[in-house]
């Protein structure tokens, strides 16, 4: 189960962009960033075209996604922003 994890796009025009996995099904995942790809209109992408980020995930958001609860786009943006901020801090050390 990778729903709720952050992922980086490895291919396509969104290469390098960070998303949260909102749903998965067989070889596909649905990705949202809270801006261009919202919770209500996520991006469908093949699993082989993403890199899962295992070092950071918001357990509360992940739990809610697994229970099929609605997540606000502001919450998605906050999770991604927090990850980016923490990864920059770790790179400095």
Image: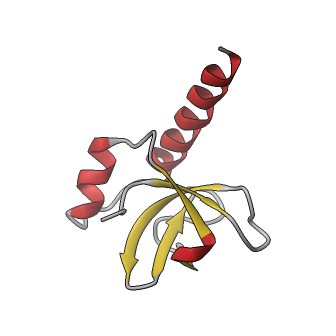
Looking at the picture, how far across and down is residue 66, in whole percent? 24, 63
Q: Is residue 45 left or right of residue 91?
A: left
Looking at the picture, how far across and down is residue 10, in whole percent? 69, 65
Quadrant position of the C terminus in the picture: top right
* Vertical side of 5 occupied by 55: above or below: above
* Vertical side of 45 occupied by 19: above or below: above
Residue plotted at (27% across, 43% down): 60
Most extreme residue toward the left is 67
- Asked whether 86 or 70 is in front, the reply is 86
Looking at the picture, how far across and down is residue 87, in whole percent? 60, 31
Quadrant position of the N terminus in the picture: bottom left
Inspect this view and state whether residue 69 appears.
no
* Vertical side of 30 occupied by 27: above or below: below
Residue plotted at (23% across, 52% down): 63
Q: Is residue 27 left or right of residue 67?
A: right
Looking at the picture, how far across and down is residue 42, in whole percent? 52, 72
Inspect this view and state whether residue 12 appears.
yes
Most extreme residue toward the right is 13
Q: In the rendered image, which quarter is residue 17 located in?
A: bottom right
């Amino acid at each position: 189960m990778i729903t709720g994890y952050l992922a980086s796009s490895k291919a396509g025009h969104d290469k390098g962009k960070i998303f949260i996995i909102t749903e998965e099904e067989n070889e596909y995942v649905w990705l949202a960033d809270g801006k261009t790809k919202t919770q209500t209109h996520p991006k469908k992408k093949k699993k082989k075209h993403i890199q899962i980020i295992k070092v950071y995930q918001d357990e509360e958001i992940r739990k809610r996604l697994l229970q099929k609860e609605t997540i606000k786009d502001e919450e998605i943006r906050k999770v991604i922003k927090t990850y980016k901020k923490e990864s920059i801090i770790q790179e400095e050390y």
